[in-house]
Image (cartoon, grey):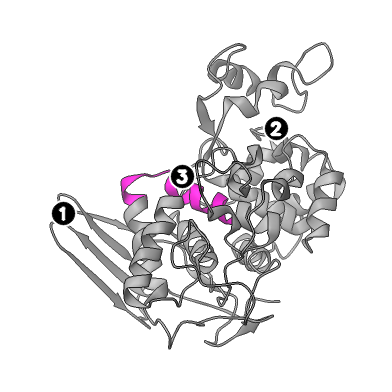
Amino acid sequence: MTVTHIRFPSLFLYVTCSSFLFLSVSKLFAPPFMAILTPPCVLMLFVPSVMVLVSSLRGFSVAELEVGFYSDSCPNAEQIVRWEVTEAANSDSTIPAALLRLHYHDCIVRGCDGSILIRDPDDASLEKKSSNHAGVRGFDVIDRAKARLEAECEGVVSCADIVALAARDAVYLSRGPYYDVPTGRRDGRVSNVSDASHMPDIRESVAVLKAKFAKKGLSEKDLVLLSAAHTIGTTACFFLEDRLYNFFEGGGSDPSINPHFLPELKLRCPAGGDINVRLPLDPGSETVFDMHILRNIRSGLGVIESDAKLYADASTRAIIDSYLGSVSPVPSFDRDFAESMVRMGMLDVHTGSHGEIRRVCSRFN
């Protein structure tokens, strides 16, 4: 799969006051701007990066998914999801990273089927109950988008597609690339906690991570690029305890941590301290989607162990270095990330007559 061209995004104007106006103007040839008015109607303006398209044509299909799948059956579907994601991000700046993580956690288990969305506080057998999904958020954004879509196009748009679209919009709102998302997924009818027990883990070796990605049909390059999604968001001290204080039997810190960075990490996450304290995964660029995290990993400033290990492995190190100028021409990080996201978004999808279109994302029909 190759990216065939780059175009500027449409102009989206959002107004949120006592009432709102939603306006989408397509096919503009002016530079991309997004204007957002938030309570009490204060104008915020930012200029995201150009859109990276996986295809230049509506109707482009990958497997049984198709760009513009809802163009006839629910033409405002993608705008509705984008609106809800934007509203949520305006209220909580951590939402884009949460939605990106939600998409990954959905796809990497049973495939992109919305299985992680099934929720019941009294049912411990559901996938969401897995400790590997600890801290995953953004469900309320998906639920709100689904409610609006059901009001406009009942029984048409799947929850699995909403998750994929929301992740794309989250990247874009963080000033990352915009890419076309092939849609047409249907929602799964299974959600089992045991299915999440073999997810990639931050403490595993790169060899194990490669093997787990390969089992899903994802490459070493996908491992690097999808790990680079950590350019936005935070992690908890809980995930750093072993790396900082028990990396070796008998204690000690991970020697790959930059010695100038280690004291800062220990100050933020002291031994015996609050394991729920959060710190950025990409220090210095945690709210902007870019490849700054690759520079941090190369410099020993990767925060979590799995990110740092990517530079200790020869093949993944070469991939990181390629984006930082070790080869010519330098590959496009934005383009390649978009392609990896599309590839991940196709994992084990239900299409056609398989699965269902849930009425409510948190429960089966």
Q: CA distance from mark 2 to mark 3?
A: 20 Å
Q: CA distance from mark 2 to mark 1?
A: 43 Å
Other residues around mark 2 within 10 Å, as few (<14) / some (14–19) / many (≥20)? many
User: What percent of the width, then of the height, locates residue 239?
Assistant: 64, 29
- Mark closest to the chain's N terminus, 2 or 3: 3
Would residue 186 be found to the left or right of residue 16 on screen?
right
Front tag of 2 and 3? 3
Question: Which quarter of the figure has residue 261?
Answer: top right
User: What percent of the width, then of the height, locates residue 169?
Assistant: 45, 62
Would residue 225 be found to the left or right of residue 276 on screen?
right
Identify residue type, mark 1.
Cys
Identify residue type, mark 2.
Gly
- Mark closest to the chain's N terminus, 3 or 1: 1
Label drawn at residue 300:
2
Residue 32 shows in the view: no
- Against 220, residue 95 (above or below) is above
Q: Which residues are magenta?
A: 89-103
- Mark closest to the chain's N terminus, 2 or 1: 1
User: What percent of the width, then of the height, locates residue 51?
Assistant: 49, 70
- Against 18, residue 5 (above or below) is below
- Against 294, residue 154 (above or below) is below
- Of helix, strand and loop, which one carries label 3? loop
- Chief secondary structure of the magenta span? helix
Q: Which residue is mark 1?
A: 41
Q: CA distance from mark 3 to mark 1?
A: 23 Å
Question: Which quarter of the figure has residue 343?
Answer: bottom right
Question: Residue drawn 54% across and 87% down?
Answer: 57
Residue 274 shows in the view: yes
Label drawn at residue 287:
3
Front tag of 2 and 1? 1
- Against 249, residue 36 (above or below) is below
Other residues around mark 3 within 10 Å, as few (<14) / some (14–19) / many (≥20)? many
